[in-house]
Image: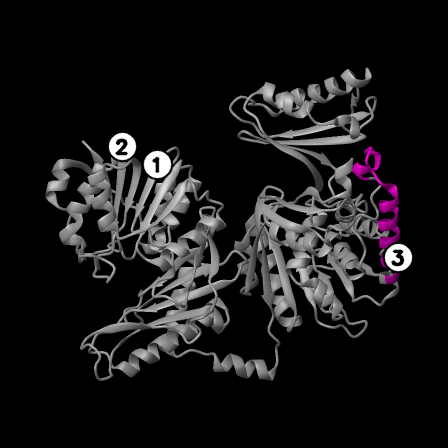
Amino acid sequence: MEQLNEQLALTATCPKGLEGLLAEELRALGASDTREQPAAVHFSGSLELAYRCCLWSRLANRIMLRLEQVRISSAEDLYRAVAAQPWERHINPSGKLWLQFSGTNREIRNSQFGAQKAKDAIVDRLRRDSGARPVIDKQNPDLTVALRLQRDRLDIAIDLSGDSLHRRGYRTHIGAAPLKENLAAALLLRAGWPQIAAEGGTLLDPMCGSGTILIEGAMIAADIAPGLLRDSFGFERWLNHQSDIWNQLREEALERRRRGLERELPEIRGYDADAKVLFAAEANIARAGLERQVRVSCRPVAAFKVPSHREIKPGLVLTNPPYGERLGEQEALRETYAELGRQLKSEFGGWLVGIFTGNPELGFETGLRSHKQYQLYNGSIPSQLLLFHVRQQSAESGAEEGARKLSPEADMVANRLRKNLRNIGKWAQKNNIDCYRLYDADLPEYAAAIDLYKSVDGQVSAHVQEYRAPASVDENKARSRLRDLVRAVQLVLEIPQRNISIKERRRHSHKGDQKGGSQYQKQADSSAASIWVTEHGAELEVNLRAYLDTGLFLDHRPVRRYLREHARGKKFLNLFCYTASATVQAALGGCEQSTSVDMSKTYQAWSARNFRRNNLDPYRHQLVEADCLQWLASAQQNRRAHYDLIFLDPPSFSNSAKMRGVLDIQRDHATLVRQCMSLLAPGGMLVFSNNLRSFKMDESLVTEFNVENLPLLDKDFQRNPKIHNVWKIQAK
């Protein structure tokens, strides 16, 4: 095949949540043009690179050679597209064939039917040219063809890996709740084990089960290719297989393994209270050829300590404890986690700890606060890797802890934050909400709002916005309270100072300042880069320092959810769109096309970044830089195309230099609403929102239209029910 001397179009599949990590690994192996999509990374490279990825990828499930991507709409289109491929170049006509088919569309509603149609196309082509036909063999095929259908797009590929690459070949014995090998490798990479191992740090697993984390850790430390123990790969009986390239790669991997095992590796040990499961671990370790490098012994969590037989360098404790869904009730496990936390705090000062669990709430039982969290999946179970730094227990650390003690007043704030974390934090976790309001002037003398933002890479940041104190409160006293508040946030959340952004609102005191005016003062580190956060499956950019607002109004979270739920098949208009987060949600909810209008260049550029991050088609989702008042008047006058869904969320007051007039939402809202209603298609809906707490809806609008108040307020803003007003407005 001529193309094998050129760059090939390749795809690596992986467990959901590992795409970014896999893309990094593939680039390190030599891949170019990497492009991520859910549970897969597309890339380019040579046949040698494809073989190298099969042999060396610690994260991929499969490596696919993409043959073609075609548009199809019917079963006949599917047949013709598959039959057009030169299958005689890939498999002997009398060979053994297997097909994997996933996906459906309007015409092909069953994957089994799709697989049958594709199989007929391949068999008919081979039989037409040679008179022979392949047999279907799932267990031992010469060629596996992978077809993926998404709407009208069909991807045709050859599976070069054969059996899933996570099956390394060393694990014949598994415990009751096995961790897949590539997921174990991902946990080690996320925890920074390669660097720790290079520096001689130790790897310990106090609940090691069948030993997968330990074995993967040893293979990383010893530079052992994860595919060396496999019996076979899918490409070995493919007609285009080039054995000379493959044999050279295997010899290179064997030599690297030999050199790696000759080095003195870091201490790698595992423990488990179940003696039976340790027999499985020992068998797996032996099959991997790592008996000298990895040791396990029977020990309960309560006896988990740093090994004392030789000088041990602090390193990584990484474990995948049971979490209730699989091995027992959650209540019975709380003490196990609490005991683990006690041992870590008393014995492992200065160590990094990683706990992988499908129930992060149990992670809190350790009494440790994670500094990083990574969202992953253990099979189909949403899970988290929680990373903790255990403090050194020394006189120095005791002095540091004393310095961090709070005043009695600030301790009240800390207690309220802890209570809110248990209440609101648990609610947010249950509902997969990563950004929420933790505190909203719950204690009047500490008047501030505290919002938590968890970025897509697991970092937690706090955004503290101080409310302006009354004139009766001394300025110095107000500043002292704010300092206490920030210290309480740092202590309770256990996050570094750099992860706390502070917006202080202060009365001006310099000559020439407007009397009675106020301003937010940004932190000195206002140039800090933006972060990306997740909301309802969308990734959105926020900036906690450089602007008055962060780019994402958290109180409008349920409003955006409502728009997303009502957007399918609709034509959507977003006025005063800000950073267009509502448009992103509507687009992901299935709106056919959208227009987002705002006069700010900054916000339009921000919106464009949000669109690109979520792969929105710019031809279907248009950004318009314009004064919304002028745009609306022009649209009404020119009778522009009607919209099925409009979101109108104007500021309460605006006198921007870019605007022709002044916007006063109480005075002007009736005009704005009527203009929007004139742009609605029959049966369409206007969602009108504003944040003016004293707002009163014009009675004439209630008479003229069907106006319904929408109580869209999530748990984290229920202390302040007047924070915004939302109405659904439709024609009568």
At label 2, which amino acid type do we have?
Ala
In the picture, measured across the screen, residue 222 lies left or right of residue 194, that is right
Q: Residue at x 37, y 66 (%)?
A: 547
From the image, which quarter does the N terminus lie in?
Answer: top right
Looking at the rendered image, the disc whose residue lies closer to the viewer, 3 or 1, is: 1
Callout 2 environment at 10 Å: few (<14), some (14 to 19), or many (20+)? some
How far apart are labels 2 and 1 at the CA level? 9 Å
Q: Which residue is mark 2?
A: 681
Q: How many marks?
A: 3
Mark 1 or mark 3, which is nearer the start of the sequence?
Answer: 3
Magenta stretch?
A: 233-259
Residue 309 locus on image (x, y percent): 81, 71
In the image, residue 94 sits, relative to residue 315, either above or below, namely: above
Q: Are marks 3 and 1 in contact (CB under 8 Å)?
A: no
Q: Which residue is mark 3?
A: 255
Q: Residue at x 64, y 73 (%)?
A: 349
Kindly state the secondary structure of the residue where label 1 is placed.
strand
Residue 310 locus on image (x, y percent): 81, 73
Q: Residue at x 11, y 43 (%)?
A: 699
Callout 1 environment at 10 Å: few (<14), some (14 to 19), or many (20+)? many
Kindly state the secondary structure of the residue where label 2 is placed.
strand
Looking at the rendered image, the disc whose residue lies closer to the viewer, 2 or 3, is: 2
Q: Which residue is mark 1?
A: 571
